[in-house]
Image (tube, rainbow, N blue to C red):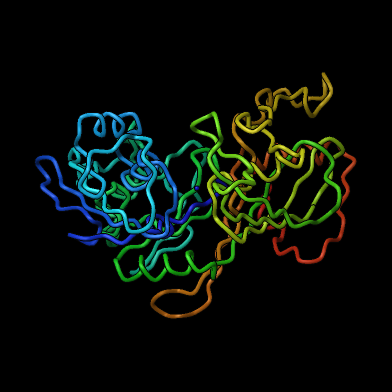
Amino acid sequence: MTGDATPAADEGNDLNTSGSPDGLLQDIDGPQQACWTVGRAKNIRLDKWLGSRIPWVSRTRLQRLVAEEAVKVNGRIPKASTKLNPGDVVDILLPPTPTKDLPAQEIPLDIIHEDEHLLVLNKQPDLIVHPARSHQSGTLINGLAWHFQNAGSGSLSGVGSDHARPGVVHRLDRFTSGVMVIAKDDTTHWRLGRQFEQRRTRKRYLALVHGDMEPLTDVLDMPLGKHPTIREKYAVRWDDTGKEAITIYRVRERYGNFTLVELEIRTGRTHQIRIHLSHRGWPIAGDDMYGGRHLEVRDILPPGSGHDRLAKLLERQALHATLLGFTHPATEEDVTFIAPLRADMAAVIRALRDRGPVQRPKVPGTELDLDVVIPEPT
């Protein structure tokens, strides 16, 4: 879930399962029989519904399983396009799940806080959170497995391990950087997950966007859903497929053709911040999926300015999860964690400040201290 952080605890809330807690009657070495009773989902395609329940199996593969009559709905052979409604019973014979024994890999981690119950880190860009179909290694989870093996500081929670995502309470997009919390035991995982689900966490992001944002603050209340034609994208959807998505933005600095904006999200939809800003005409710098452009030196500084070392300023979306606050599951204390900007995004902002002029409007409701979160180079 982009900046878009999508809580793992939100997945599957519209179904009731039979069999094991996940609805899976598991045989680790072979196929699995799964049985679900549809909950709140209404008039949704079978292949799409299955895809949200079984993330390690591609939609094409699921459609093939349906065609091979490995799926039944209410005891009958369906089509991939069959529409599901509450109370329908779905049976499927699945290929084996990914192994729970994730390979430990030495991946640098910027750890902000760690105790016996949880770990908080500042995720670097270009790092996938958990193994997926096309990335079985080189993920944050692989790096955490190495950290726990070598630091002797605990382990990942077992929640989500059947989906190759142990300990993952919420996620950030691959190229979004910033603060994340990881659960080290099951009780912590469920308690944190409930806070995300009930929107009791506090989240603030910083983004650098194309354009001069006006007004200085606003509430972006636009429902989001899958893009109608492009599989990997999401979009503003005003039809019955759209889910509530609310983002509050507050301008922090203006540089003429770019704006630094602080964002507060009330929901955690996939790509939420990226879509909301792009829809209003302010795509995030570097976000070529939603209308932004990768930044080069000529986008910011005139030729011969002495900043040639920044020839490639930014090759990913300039979006950073800066603040995360929640109630600690064990101590019940309110805690807040701040992740300073990663070096690439901080360098672009410093270059824009050097270029000038810079406007710093006073906008009520801002929370981030820019002197803290945009560190000077060492």
Residue 297 location, x and y as percent? 74, 25
Of all residues, the one furthest to the bottom in this rendering is 332
> Residue drawn at (62%, 44%), measured in percent from left and top?
237
Q: How many marks?
A: 0
**Image position of 180 with respect to 76: above or below:** below
Residue 163 location, x and y as percent? 29, 48
Which corner quadrant of the image does residue 194 belong to? bottom left
Image quadrant in which the C terminus is located: top right
| Residue 311 in sight from this viewpoint | yes
User: Between residues 77 and 240, which one lies in front from this camera angle?
Assistant: 77
Residue 330 location, x and y as percent? 38, 77
> Residue drawn at (25%, 57%), measured in percent from left and top?
22
> Residue drawn at (29%, 57%), measured in percent from left and top?
37
304 displayed left or right of 348: right
User: Between residues 97 and 346, which one lies in front from this camera angle?
Assistant: 97
96 displayed left or right of 41: left
